Image: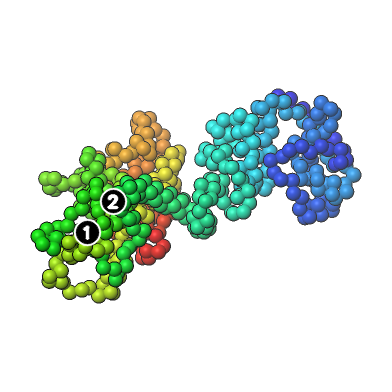
Amino acid sequence: MDTTMNLIHVSPSELTILSNIRDAQVSPDLVASIRDHGLLEPINAYRADSGALVVKHGHRRTLAACEAGLESVPVVVTAAPADDLDGKADLIAAQWDENQQRQNLTAREQADTIAQLAAFGVSPAQISKRLRVDRSTVDAATTMTNTAVLDEYDLTITQAAIVAEFSDDPRAVERLIRAARHGQFDHQAARLRQDREIDAAVAQARPEWEAKGVRIMEGWPDYNAPGEWVSSLVDIDTGEHAEVDHNAPGDHIAVQLRADYTTVLTATGEPVDPYELYEDDDQDIPEGGITHSQVHEELVVTHRLYCDNPAARGWKRLGATAPAPAATEQDKEAARAERRDVIAANKAWLAAEQVRRDWLKTFCARKTAPKNSAPFIAATIANSPHLLASERLRSEREHYLTVKDAAEMSTAKATMTSLALCLIAHEANTHKGSWRHIDPRTTAYLRFIEAQGYALSPVERRACGETVPTDEL
């Protein structure tokens, strides 16, 4: 590479400006400063084959010098960049470094720069290396179809790509923009994606029922409606529970379709109560007891049949001959509110879980542990040694961490590995009910990662003992 440099003085009007990754917007302050003090830092240019001096670095200073009316400016003449894709990529990367150090590029300028390198055929891995940006940022920038959104909202490139994902839903975009202002963007995006998955699952189940002539209920029946859920009806003559042939449901039948993430046995797919699971290392698991490692969360669509005219089907309400005392409207609303809260919190926890685990995987790749890690490591070993020996840790740690020969590790690497194993053990100990039953170990874990920069979601704050209303989940 030719590193020869020559300092010359020329009129700024003699300099040729081609493309630059930054929009060359000259501020009045810069023009005034150059008019009063001259150009204190030389412009970097190269001599083209035509003899023209082409600016490599200093586009805004060149324009400001012209506007300020300077007769001459200092120019350092260096070798021209190679006239190939690699040379152009090197020039763009150099402009990136200069602009980032002088004044951070806007998110749109960053996205456009990444897209320009991609258009030159530079691989995402090489773009990430040359510009020293995360691969996720490169991937987001190369898939964005409209970078103007970065000027409209104060977002990162990755966030803008997610906003574009929901561009057909103004309410979702509004929620994302609002969440970005409060450090909750990733959590809100996870919730919105979760909602879309649920809506898609219900939509997929609708045609089967519609083909049978069954009305799909869009909400809950009116409290004064004469109908009743089929599960609460019996035959007027025999007293047996009402039954509906799913292949030919008949008249006066409607169906409510709901989808939710349900805890199911991995072996059979059978739903189980998540609050009756045992830890894998419990010593007193009864026969038939189910442990956390035997289950997983799965999106399940359920249906509930409703009859809008029980008498027409020869049915009556179960226990109608001796009705129980009617619950007050206040009791009903309290029960509904509790149910809404449980559903909302369960969904919020599962959405937050994915965000948290993605963050943890990145954190575990650190080379050194934070300075305040030793007390957390010691507390985990002293107070919760069983977590480090659990079957769930052994089955999950490979997702986050590859532990090579520990005996060959440096002290810094060994400390970081110890911290990672403690964090993974605590993460493996969490479950969908962690928000409901406050565990000091989970609280300590969540507060520790919060101190390392992870933004707790509202449901995670509830798991730490904070009071969080349903509408904030």
Whole-percent x and y of residue 8? 85, 35
Q: Answer with mark 1 or mark 2, whichever residue precedes in sequence.
A: 1
Alpha carbon distance from label 1 to label 2: 14 Å
Q: Which residue is mark 2?
A: 302
363 lies above or below 87:
below
Residue at figure coordinates x 39%, y 60% from the top left: 473
Secondary element at image label 1:
helix
User: In the picture, residue 425 is in which quadrant?
Assistant: top left
Kind of residue sitting beneath label 2: Thr
Whole-percent x and y of residue 129? 56, 34
Residue 134 got which mark? none
Whole-percent x and y of residue 160? 55, 48
Comparing 240 with 410, the one in front is 240
Comparing 310 with 358, the one in front is 310
Q: Residue furthest right?
A: 71
Residue at figure coordinates x 81%, y 37% from the top left: 16
Comparing 211 with 233, the one in front is 211
Q: Which residue is mark 1?
A: 230
Kind of residue sitting beneath label 1: Val
Mark 1 Cα shell of 10 Å, populated few (<14), some (14-19), many (≥20): many
